Image (cartoon, rainbow, N blue to C red):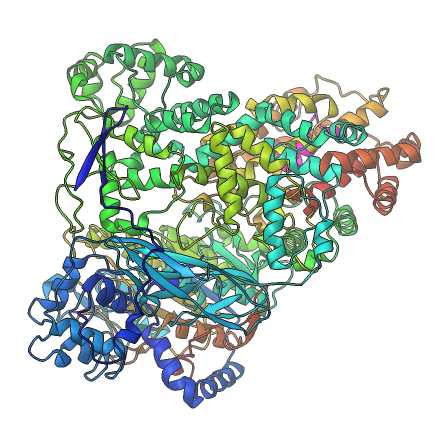
Amino acid sequence: MWSAVCLMMGFLVATPETPRVETSSIAPIKPASERFAAATDEVPDFRRHVLPLLSRLGCNGRACHGSFQGQGGLRLSLFGYDFDEDLTALTKGESPRVLAKDPAASKMLQKATEAVDHGGGQRMTADGWEHRLLVDWIKAGASGVKPSHHLNKLVIEPALIRFEEAGQTKNVRVTAYWSDGHNEDVTCLCRFQTNNSSFATVDETGKITSAARGDTNVIAFYDNGVAATSVITPVSHPSEATYAAVPAPTRVDELVMERLKLLGILPSRLTRDEEFLRRVSLDIAGTLPTAEEVRAFLKDKDPDKRSKKIDELLSTDAYAAWWATKFCDFTGDAEAEFDAPFQKPIARQWYEWVYKRVKENMPYDELVAGMVLGTGREQGESYASYSQRMTDILGKGQDDAFADRPTLPHFWARKSLRTNEAKALRFAHAFLGIRLECAQCHKHPFDQWTKQEFDEFTAFFQRVNYGVAPDATKEFRALQSETGLAELKGKEQRERLIELVKQGKPIPVREVFVATSDKAGKVVGKKKNPTPSRAITPTLLGGEEVVLSSKEDPRAAVLEWMRRADNPYFATAIVNRVWAHYFGVGIIDPPDDLNLANPPSNEKLLTELTKGFIESGYDMKWLHRTVTNSHAYQRSWEPNETNKLDSRNFSRALLRRLPAEVTFDAVAVATSASSVQHKLITDTKHRAVYLGGVGPSGGPANFALKIFGQSDRKTICDCARDSDPSVSQAIYMQNDRDVNAALDRPDGWVKEVTNKLKPEQPVVSKTNSAVKDPKTGFTLAEINDKITKMERRISSDKLTDAEKKQMNVRLTRLKQAKTSLTPATPKPSPKTENAKVDHAERQRMVEEVYLRTVSRYPTTEERAEATRYLKDSPNLASGLRDLLWVMLNTKEFITNH
Amino acid sequence: MSILNHHGVLGRREFLRLGVLGTTGLTLANYLQAANAGAAHGKARSAIFIHLAGGPSHLDTFDPKPEGPTDIRGEFSTIETKTAGLRISEQLPNLAKCSNLYSVLRGVSHNLAAHDLGQNYVLSGNRPTAGLEYPAMGAVITKELTVDRDLPPYVAIPRANVGPGYLGVAYGAFDTNAAPKAGQPFVVRGLTAPGASTTKTVSRRHQLLKNLDNRFGSFQSEDQLLAGLDQFSQKAYDILQSSRTREAFDIAKESPEIHKRFGGSSLGQSALLASRLVEAGVRFVTITDGGWDTHQDNFNRLKEKLLPGLDQGVSALLTTLEERGLLKETVVIVTGEFGRTPKINKDTGRDHWPRAMFMLVAGGGIRPGQVIGSSDETGAGPKDTTITPDDVVATLFTTLGIDPTKEYHTPIGRPVMIVREGKPIPELIG
């Protein structure tokens, strides 16, 4: 029974006409463990009772008969849900597991009770209800699934358990609500799992035991249903008055505090202004504030200065650059995904397209729509015009022109997205924050997804192709032969392509297109059938079938579904990811793993934020503002006795290592001369947050980005970005040529300060410019020039290791020659130089170093210590360099706190 | 979020332990025995773990079934070795010649057929569970054994696949970020001598860092990130201050003969580097060698690339360590995260198969020249007794003098044994 509803976008959505059963209207029947405790007339149902029981007993687990090669000759579908296959496996074949004549002698029972040898040991006893249930099912004919019903809902009660202390226990009850009105207590047929056994454990009967003060979730699994209960053992018992004294100025704060009260946790104090400024600048714009900015912010008396700073940061190019990088992380822009020789410009085009939209604050749903509906040619564009246009864009580096195109096809053009399955996986992860990998082969072990549902979702992407569209085949071939590319291969072909593009001659480009010839998608709105069938109807996650005409873009149907206000994933996924960015932990965590067995730590908070975000018109800046203006975001890292161990309820700031790109930029900004700092920050196109946006590639920052864990964008996981520290990172900060160069560069701060102090620095002696080194035959000027060039070459990453070694040998020789030509320059004695600087001035320098690295003034002790160090240094330059080096190597610098 | 509870209720081993051993108290006795064994042994000083990432076929290497049906046996025939009763793949002639230096474990078995889960299991010796990430062996070794302060205790070539888990980032590996290449100097960037500064100024500067880097007060020792940053920073300083680490990484210091012996493969060159590192005093080296996930074209890939590198690299490592008198104090383990399906698939490949795999173990007082355990006729599972990854890791720790039953506390205070399930394999260390 299906009705077809015509939607304005021109495709059909069929919805089941099953009347919605009011889940609470019918009292659930008693659990099977009671009903089958003694002889009964009831015939057990294969789907409702037999398979869930087998699941609970572990029969279809991966280690046992759920293994893809089976076990002991019996193979069941992993975690159940392939009903026909499982029924066949049990009842048919050479060695059926059921014996109708003598049910109790059935092999499946003999094995499970270990009456005969069983590799899996004894799973039940012969006198239990489990045994009777299975015997009764076999007796009644061991029949399979009645296709009429499906599970509407699985409910676990209580939904929240609050213990007083560790060791206490509580039993949960799980009820299954079926589409035919059958409601049943299925507690004894569920599998249970705790999400953190350190806080609570659960046994197979659903008895939960508190293990320690804190909170986690216990999950029940039954059929394709997953239900979670929140288990709390309060950390302490503060008075109402204590909580009343904590202001909650925003809705976010009210909801966070609501949860903290339940947990008996008190939040940390608010950040001081300088702490807030550093945190919010790094988070929103990936930018370290300058000393000048910190001073100005601290002086500002405006009570709204924090909000204003947030708005100011959101309007910077750096915000757009950094968040475009984040979006490209989520969606997987990487050079390795595209064909040579244009992989670099194509990855860059992708980034620029996103950057432009983040900069304009395009509503998130529209931005995503442009990626989802990406096609090569624009509406009505001819192939000839398209290939000419793409050639021009490549040849002239017109990334802006590319960014102006309404859609971004590159998401679909990737090498790793050649199969429909890969398209579905990437899509689900990028835009819905869900991981479908498991359902690719079997029932998802901790979510509702079945293999059939995965296949049905995959069907949406079947017609999305990358290649030569049928209407362009002729032109494509003609271009291939005209350009001579048809006869070329490999390197020669790549070189010709580059040459053609340079000359502006159109090249045969491939494109993303939606095939209209509908090979596999000939679908009609037929009844949803739980048994696998060959013709797969595209079905949205959650169960709606979509009837597509052969000319529609099937992705539009998915997009329409995503944009519905009640879509459980699309808006939630980005809201949760943005939250996770600011807090170091998602409301659902990992942030890209939205599944029923991984419930949010604060459901109300996530729901309300998501609702607000949709109502704002998917306004990203609304989301950033709402999160960062909350006290929850502006709390200190300093823990108190109650929240020391809390890492998921937002009672304090979690310390986070700076992300790779942000670290590289922060080193550059902290070490640069004040005169160039502003340009360095605002000229975003030279910063790592922008350059690194295309993912792993060459370039000067590449090494640093790699060891600091830039996303490789290969793994379909947000965790592809690594935020752990390592010895390699410490070695980099202490001794890498990048950091040394940053400290010593001509437009660096150390040079700036020392140059100012000794403008009249006399040139001690002049070398006769005509004198040549006897060994090399070069003058000093020539040698200096060569050394500079050589050093640049060596650090360019363009040389092979062997070439580098060779060059280093030559470099050493030149340096020796240089020393022999340069007359010994008498160093200014410490006394003379340091005498020019008085104590107050030294203190100001110390202050400056603190402000430009850790964005705060030094404490009295720190100031004294550092000032003394400067005074005792052999010369001012080396003292300042050391102090700057020291501050770069503090934990305070490398973390966001 | 964990992954594991879903993969079957209790594994067979756990079932047995809880059901039988748990009630008789045998567990404790075994643990005590193991603990004593640990005290008695500890001949080893270092270990090298060669991880054949992707999961090498046991049937085409150390556990062939020459009598098996063609769709299982595969394309390779077998050859004799120096070890009585041990026949291995014909593609491993050099390893056949030095089999007196190692023992082979067959029918090592677990049930996690996904790469990451299997790697976590094999490299930690603990089956992954909900809400707790177990530390890689190298992290435990870093915690338990002292190392000269100017050396990294734990080096991963090119990088570690399994992290330090609940021990925290401070016990993570030092990644080289690259594998050495034949004929090219190997420099770990950043390990060059620190600038032009003199030792005196460098140490003065370092003292200043110590004095100023105290913003987080006592929270420094409670927060994992801060503790990790601290430890790494100190370590980096010590490493940079001495030339030992630099020299250990400098494989060019080896003679051309030695280079030739290890061969040009990435595995061979990495093994050469590993031998220098343990000689310098590094405690634990992991080599991750990729490409073993042979779902397609198993035999050609093994024959042309994978097995020659393994054969030459590992045999060179064992003989070189032996010649230098280092083998007796260096444990070497070679294995993957699982074996591969006995049945050859339609793409002439083999798929993931954790129920039977091989491991090669040598050195550090481990008794060589044995075959321990066996798989069934088709190589589908263990024949009699089951050896688990837990047992192998417990053995490794025991040889290093680390008691595998020692309890750690997770950050929230939960007690956990270093290896929860395994017992040292008596034939190897008895």
Viewer-proximal residue among A37 and A887: A37
Q: Is residue A746 visible?
A: yes
The residue nearer to you, when weighing A765 against B347, is B347
Is residue A749 found inside the magenta-colored segment of the image?
yes
Query: Is residue A700 among what the camera can see?
Result: no
- Locate the C terminus of chain B by quadrant: bottom left
Residue B66, placed above or below residue B370: above
- Indicate the position of residue A809 as horizontal and vertical percent values: 56, 36
Relative vertical location of residue A254 with respect to residue A170 in this rendering, above or below: above
Q: Residue at x 52, y 22 (%)?
A: A359
Residue in the foreground of this view, choosing between A321 and A240: A240
Magenta span dominant secondary structure: helix
The image quarter in which residue A561 lies: top left
The residue at the far bottom in this view is: B24
For the N terminus of chain B, the image quarter is: bottom left
Report the magenta residues as a range.
A739-750
Residue A721, image x and y in percent?
A: 49, 43
Count of numbered labels shown in the rendering: 0
Q: Is residue A72 above or below residue B353?
A: below
Residue B260: x and y in percent read: 38, 54
Q: Is residue A870 magenta?
A: no
Horizontally, residue A92 falls left or right of residue A696, namely: left
Position of B43 with respect to B62 (left or right) is right
**Which residue is more in the foreground, B267 or A463?**
A463
